[in-house]
Image: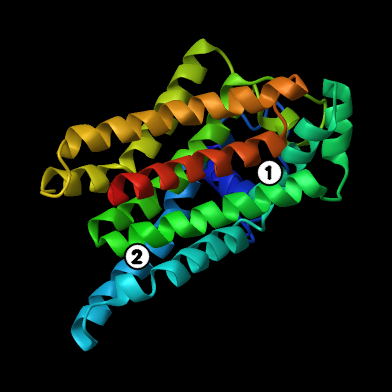
């Protein structure tokens, strides 16, 4: 697959964009996962641009208090947009993983529970808690002011990087499904290294505006160093989360990738929200 086709494949897998590409096949989808962070950047850029535009418009036609009065609603709408744009794909994975981890005692049994299309109590609770945490965190970030909104761009990219790590470094838990078609299919060591380097660079690029803003920040002590440390921590989280989630199943599945995306994304949003409220 060429680069353009790989990018189209990544958007077809992770979003609801009506792109026609062949279904991923093991050995022929080697580099699709490399572009997952790029999908995250696009998903983050749309609501981030809308938030910046609304704040600029509000400053011109009103008293500029949009961030404080509409923060929570804005947070809910951003989460709703992400869920809609991704066809609730990651949320389905989160619910399935939660049900399987807490409902099964063996890897085989957990895989059976994961394959059940119904959502149990564990899954419903996990979805509700993550959705609330994301909406509240984004609301707080919106209320902090203009510079903080860059996190809405960076968080989705970091979350999708976790799916890249899962695909490139993990092994498939089943001989079918998205995990089997993408996981462990990066090729040789050189190809794997290049793939990871480009993916990490793409995710890091989403943090650059935040770091540039921090360079002129007079509110937080630590400035760029503190923000860089947070960005590095999120990258480590993106690496660790899919590995931890894959253990109960003996490998990576599409649901594990989806859950990794949301958990990493949520950790990023929550940490920045708490940092800003400190």
- Residue 201: x and y in percent read 36, 32
Query: In this view of the protein, which residue sits in the foreground, 97 or 47?
Result: 97
Q: Which residue corresponds to mark 1?
A: 94
Q: Does residue 165 appear left or right of residue 19 in this picture?
A: left
Q: Does residue 136 appear left or right of residue 54 in this picture?
A: right
Q: Residue at left 54%, top 64%?
A: 81
Q: Can residue 107 be seen here?
A: yes
In the image, is residue 84 above or below residue 115?
below
Q: Image quadrant of residue 111?
A: top right
Query: In this view of the protein, which residue sits in the foreground, 20 or 70?
Result: 70
Dot 2, how many residues are within 10 Å of its Cα: few (below 14), some (14-19), or many (20+)? some
Q: Residue at left 31%, top 44%?
A: 275
- Residue 233: x and y in percent read 38, 29
Counting residues from the start of the chain, the first of labels 1 and 2 encountered is 2
Spatial distance from mark 1 to mark 2, Cα to Cα? Answer: 27 Å
Q: Secondary structure at mark 1?
A: helix
Dot 1, how many residues are within 10 Å of its Cα: few (below 14), some (14-19), or many (20+)? many
In the image, is residue 221 above or below residue 232?
below
- Residue 100: x and y in percent read 80, 35
Q: Which residue corresponds to mark 2?
A: 49
**Which is more foreground, mark 1 or mark 2?**
1
Quarter of the picture containing the N terminus is top right
Q: Residue furthest front?
A: 278
Query: In this view of the protein, which residue sits in the foreground, 14 or 132?
Result: 132
Q: Residue at left 64%, top 41%?
A: 258
Q: Residue at left 37%, top 59%?
A: 140
In the image, is residue 256 above or below residue 59?
above
- Residue 175: x and y in percent read 82, 25
In the image, is residue 99 above or below residue 186?
below
Q: Residue furthest top?
A: 189
């Amino acid at each position: 697959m060429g680069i353009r086709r790989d990018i189209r494949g990544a958007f077809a897998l992770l979003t609801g964009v009506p792109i026609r590409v062949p279904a991923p096949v093991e050995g022929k989808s080697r580099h699709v996962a490399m572009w997952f962070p790029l999908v995250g950047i696009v998903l983050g850029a749309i609501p981030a641009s809308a938030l910046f535009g609304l704040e600029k418009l509000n400053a011109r036609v009103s008293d500029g208090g949009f961030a404080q009065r509409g923060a929570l609603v804005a947070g809910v709408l951003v989460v709703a947009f992400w869920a809609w744009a991704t066809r609730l794909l990651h949320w389905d994975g989160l619910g399935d993983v939660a049900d399987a981890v807490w409902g099964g005692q063996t890897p085989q049994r957990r895989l059976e529970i994961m394959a059940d299309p119904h959502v149990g109590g564990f899954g419903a609770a996990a979805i509700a808690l993550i959705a609330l945490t994301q909406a509240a965190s984004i609301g707080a970030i919106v209320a902090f002011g203009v510079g903080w909104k860059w996190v809405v761009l960076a968080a989705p990219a970091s979350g999708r990087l976790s799916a890249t790590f899962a695909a490139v470094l993990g092994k498939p838990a089943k001989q079918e499904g998205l995990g089997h078609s993408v996981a462990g299919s990066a090729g040789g060591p050189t190809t794997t290294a290049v793939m990871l380097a480009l993916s990490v660079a793409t995710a890091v690029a989403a943090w650059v505006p935040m770091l540039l803003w921090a360079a002129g920040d007079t509110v937080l002590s630590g400035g760029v160093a503190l923000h860089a440390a947070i960005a590095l921590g999120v990258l480590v989280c993106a690496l660790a989360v899919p590995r931890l989630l894959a253990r109960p199943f003996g490998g990576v599945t599409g649901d594990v990738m989806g859950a990794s995306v949301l958990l990493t994304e949520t950790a990023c949003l929550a940490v920045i929200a708490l940092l800003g409220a400190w």
